[in-house]
Image (cartoon, helix red, strand yellow):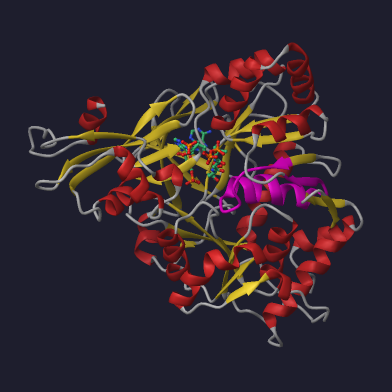
Amino acid sequence: MPELELVERAKTFGARVALTSGGQDHSYDSLLSASAGIAASLLDGSTDLGEERVAYLIGASFEYTAVQWGIWRAGGIAVPLSLSSADPELEHVITDAQVDRIIVLEHSLEKLRPLCDRLSKPLLNYDQLSSEESLPLPDLDGERRAMILYTSGTTSKPKGVVSTHANIQAQITTLVEAWGWQSDDSIPLFLPLHHVHGIVNVMSCGLWSGARVDCVGPFDATEVLERVADRQYTVFMAVPTIYVKLIRILEDADEKDLARFTDGFAQMRLMVSGSAALPASVHEQWTGLTSQKLLERYGMTEIGMGLSNPLHGERRPGAVGQPLPGVVIRLVSESGEVIEAEGEPGEIQVRGPCVFSEYWDKPDVTRDSFVDGWFRTGDMSVLEDGYYRIMGRLSVDIIKSGGYKLSALEIEATLLTHPAIRECAVVGLPDHTWGEVVAVAVVAAEGEQVELPDLKEWAASRMSAYKIPKTLLLLEDLPKNAMGKVTKPVIRDLF
Ligand code: MCA
Ligand code: AMP
């Protein structure tokens, strides 16, 4: 039986460049042989990992992809960890997913060793993993579970979204078809690789197509702009925050640099924005500077991409277009009625082969997230002149900052462990660069004081930097509404 289609296709691309990483080009052949070596080493004589969860903490690189493919080819479930996570966040993922082994590069061994020792989890060094031995690899059907990505929600701790190989393949193929991916495409990868945007839209679509994926590392505007000016890319994908940051640099650039950078953008065949709302003003500013019309699309960890403006045709600022091939979308009113008419807002519900299989080890939450086989996204939308427009989330407890989805409840639960905090409420405040920024209103414990710089320092070892409150409001007693409740909209108004 052939291997995964992603792998079978790579065999046909042979000596073409798959990934540029650490200043070196790596061919599809070398990706295949490195991942086969890792698979053999993980299997260690057994025939199939049988959905063992293998985690890895590796930045965007050839090694990242070789490990991901190695786990898949050996029959395991890949659990990518976030480079920006603090130890308690890593611990949650490792224990919740019941991870058996963790792979890192040599330079991260010391960072993870104390945690892995405490959790009694084997920590593997990438350099010692590859095996020269070529073992037969297991047959994998599409229903085999392939990946767990952690996503924040309306529960206090992030949940593991489980996707099968068939789900991932559907998420890839819909985009390859809709956005016209080709083997002569080349794309920069600077997004984090523990989320769908970086993993599926950029890396996996590129590799499925025989294209070149350039692993830039964490986003560095100057580095990216130089490579753009060098005309290295045909496709570009980023979150709105990145476009806002690039606009600021382009506006400050001298005439010569501005021309180099904008010419580099202008010659690309496709530029995409997603993961958070792209303000129409940013869309228009970008077109004014580069003559590129950004293609905005809408997606979610649980479904991959659902809605997209067209590759050919009107790309409407402020709208996310229409369902992608194979994705079925409906809007449902608060009272549960399916909305047929344009202009009436409702919750987006999704069906199709791209929809995830379950939340890891959470059958009740999984059940509650579907109605009659439709996945409930929690996003509100409206259809206007044939295009969907996203109106926001149903829950005020979900914050989108820099493209990251954050749970206000998770941040509050951590802040409440601070000895000087008696009560707190976390809200997202609108922000031009970040979309939203995290703010917290705090009631101090008796006789205690809470200062923002101290709170930030305290939080740094407990949560990712983008979750740390950037603004603090101290309240003797949070104002309550007529029902005696503290409401987040009221708190937002107080900032
Ligand atoms: C960082 N800073 C922030 C935030 N993040 N301040 C406010 N709000 C934030 N969210 C501060 C830091 O504390 C630091 O401050 C300074 O900004 C620089 O931090 P750094 O981490 O270096 O920031 P950056 O490199 O400029 O990061 C911006 C970024 C990053 C590149 C936009 O946030 C990013 O990669 N976002 C993409 C996330 C993503 O891929 N999401 C996809 C998930 P100081 O200088 O004072 O220390 S959504 C998804 O996958 C679905 C399926 C979809 O639809 O795509
Ligand atoms: P995540 O759970 O991290 O995958 O983030 C998915 C969420 O990001 C969605 O449920 C939306 O709330 C938001 N999102 C993604 N793309 C867009 C977009 N183009 N416009 C508005 N919100 C978006």
Residue 388 forms part of the magenta stretch: no
Residue 189 higher or lower than 43, as above or below: above
The foreground one among 445 and 47 is 445
Question: In which quadrant will I find the C terminus?
Answer: top left
The reply, left or right, for residue 159 in relation to residue 60 is: left
The verdict on residue 212 being magenta is yes
Question: Viewed as shown, does residue 390 lie left or right of 483?
Answer: right
Q: In the figure, 20 relative to 48: above or below?
A: above
Q: In front here: 431 or 334?
A: 431
Residue 397 relative to residue 66: left or right: left
**Residue 409 % position (x, y):** 30, 49
The image quadrant of residue 81 is bottom right
Q: Residue at x 73, y 40 (%)?
A: 188
Vertically, is 162 above or below 227?
A: below
Which segment is the magenta one? 188-215
When the figure is inspected, residue 225 is found, relative to residue 145, above or below; the finding is above
Residue 294 spot, x, y in % from top left? 65, 25
Could you tell me if residue 417 is visible in this image? yes
Give how far across and how far down residue 354 sits, in percent: 58, 52
Residue 381 visible here: no
**Closer-to-camera residue (243/383):** 243
Q: Residue at x 21, y 54 (%)?
A: 419
Q: Nearer the viewer, residue 147 or 193?
A: 193
Mark count:
0
Kindly give the residue lying farthest to the right in the view shown: 15
Q: Is residue 304 left or right of residue 174?
A: left
Give how far across and how far down residue 31 sits, in percent.
80, 62
